[in-house]
Amino acid sequence: MLDVDLSGYRGHSQASVGITAVEVDPVKRRNFVGAGALVGIAAGVPTASAKGRRLGRTDVERFRQRIADLRRLDDYTGGSSVFPLAAEEINKLSTVAASGSYTESVGRGLLSTLGELFQFASWTAFDAGRLPQAKQLAVTAASAANQAGDRTLAATALSELSYLTASSSNPKEGVSMARASLANAPSDVLPAVRVVLADRLAWASARVGDASGVDRALGISESAHDQRDLEAAGEPDTVYWINRDESQIMAGRCWAELRRPKKAVPILEDVTAPYDDTHAREVALYACWLAGSYLDAGDVDKAVNSASRAVSLSRSTASRRTDAQIDTMLKRFEPHRDSGPVRDLLASSR
């Protein structure tokens, strides 16, 4: 199992969840106590109906379905609006689990689901511009997954932490984290999960300027996609979003980050087409990367068109991450402000 150092992170309980009795020992419930504090919510007080209630698989599935619903909502609205909803779900689950009774299997399911919630909250916090909190939540997600015996979730949580770290101003540690998430994933991990881990390793490699590392990681991703095509096994909702287009977009992002427009532009021009403007955040981000690659290729007019689309779409989503990406992109147009279209772009984006 993955070992994650949680020193310095608030709200983590050192108690493990090696549940052996039919009823979960009250000490083991400490894993759920105070979980809401990690997302800025005071400890919940169990209601009369929740206190001491017997919990079963239907309760686990109910919370997992709620996460699935929130993931789809995030696709359309952005992390700033969805993070409070994820925080509320964490508080609900932890409050019920801290006071209820359940079997070993259900207890592990509840803890694994809490880990999923932490991971999702980490993503929405990142999108909302709360990077330190997002990192803390990703670490806590990995810890909950480890204690629940869910090695796949532990690997994806560490992978998410690698992505957050690689996307920060100090990306170096992101590479080692991404490599560890791949190395420590279960040998029978689903191909779709391996795709996600490999794509994030590619991004971390790009952020430190390692083009050969990007190539290797993208090769792993492609092989995992091929394996996925051959298998008909059911996949968890956590990977509902990953497909070859998403991996191609990651490839385009990586080459854009490395300032390789001859590689980035054809990819980003081709794969952005399937995404309509209802996915405003995603399309705005893709348009940002494409605009930067056009600038690297010396095509200012196309860069302006792509940047204008990004600016327009960003107004339809609650994503501070997207806003920051657009600000970074617009700064790259400063050397071209003598051009009329560039002046118009910069003026309209204020």
Image (cartoon, rainbow, N blue to C red):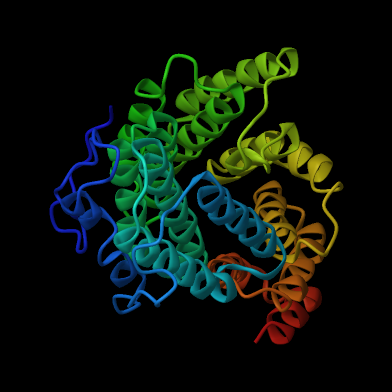
Can I make out residue 143 in this image?
yes
Image position of 120 with respect to 77: above or below: above
Residue at 40% across, 24% down = 185
Image position of 200 with respect to 292: above or below: above
* Nearer the observer, 14 or 52: 52
Percent from the top left, x then y, of residue 74? 64, 63
Percent from the top left, x then y, of residue 230? 73, 12
Percent from the top left, x then y, of residue 21? 24, 36
Can I make out residue 172 in this image?
no
User: How many numbered marks, from 0 up?
Assistant: 0
* Nearer the observer, 286 or 25: 25
Image quadrant for the N terminus? top left
Q: Is residue 185 left or right of residue 127?
A: left
Image position of 39 with respect to 297: above or below: below
Q: Quadrant of residue 291?
A: bottom right
* Nearer the observer, 199 or 59: 59
Q: Is residue 86 left or right of residue 174?
A: right
Q: Is residue 196 left or right of residue 269?
A: left
Percent from the top left, x then y, of residue 278? 82, 64
Q: Quadrant of residue 174?
A: top left
Q: Is residue 190 left or right of residue 339?
A: left
Image quadrant for the C terminus? bottom right
